Image (cartoon, rainbow, N blue to C red):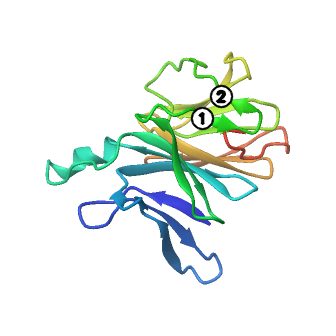
Amino acid sequence: MYWSQEGNTTTPSAIIQMDPRTLKTQVVKNNFYGHRFNSLNDLVISDSGMVFFSDGYYGWDNFNYTLFPELPNGIYRWDMHSGNIKMVAGAAEQALFNPNGIAHREIFAYVDAGFPDGIKTDRHGHVYAAVTGSVDIFDRHGTLLGRTKVAAGDVAVNMAWAANWLYIFGQNNVYRVELNTTELTSLPVFS
């Protein structure tokens, strides 16, 4: 099991691995060529062992000007097998590659409340976006198909699937929603 840890003034932001049998944890990645990550958020692991994750400035707001970012905002690709890591989108303005060629940058969809945090896709090309108050579901063209609401005042920050259940992680609660399909799989947005 892997997750991203935001970090603080004494502990760098990192990707953490946990053995579910022993609950032992270890840091597996906490820097980009010696430069401390900012505030890791969201990671997706492909079947081939490629980890895509975002690193933004938002966590620095809590440091009260005692630490300053060493890296620009960006999306990274880390090969768990070779250890190779590369910024694939962000201030470096490098092209984001996928198995079918270069991914074109364009506005996919708009959300009514805030901005998407966690984003997942299913096997049918539907895009699930965790936003303030709900998880919004879009078709592959960006048309809103539906919305699964969370409690008033809560913010959906991410989600995961298990069988035909969608687990929504809010700032204050974890929600479980039964879906009418078993073909949902957490796939990287980059595939």
Question: Which mark is drawn over residue 96?
Answer: 1
Question: Which mark is drawn over residue 103?
Answer: 2
Q: Calculate the distance from the C-alpha at mark 1 to the C-alpha at mark 2.
A: 6 Å
In the orientation shown, which residue stands out farthest toward the bottom? Answer: 22
First in sequence: mark 1 or mark 2? 1
Please, what is the three-letter code of the amino acid marked with disc 2?
Ala
- Residue at (46%, 48%) from the top-left corner? 41
User: Toward which corner of the image does residue 144 lie, by quadrant?
Assistant: top right
Task: Residue 177 in the image: state x and y as whole percent.
Answer: 69, 43
Q: Say if 189 sits above or below 161 in the image.
A: above
- Residue at (66%, 66%) from the top-left corner? 81
Lateral position of residue 141 relative to residue 76, left or right: right
Residue in front for this viewpoint, 63 or 133: 63
Q: Quadrant of the N terminus?
A: bottom right
Q: Say if 167 sits above or below 18 in the image.
A: above
- Residue at (68%, 43%) from the top-left corner? 188
Task: Residue 117 in the image: state x and y as whole percent.
Answer: 50, 37
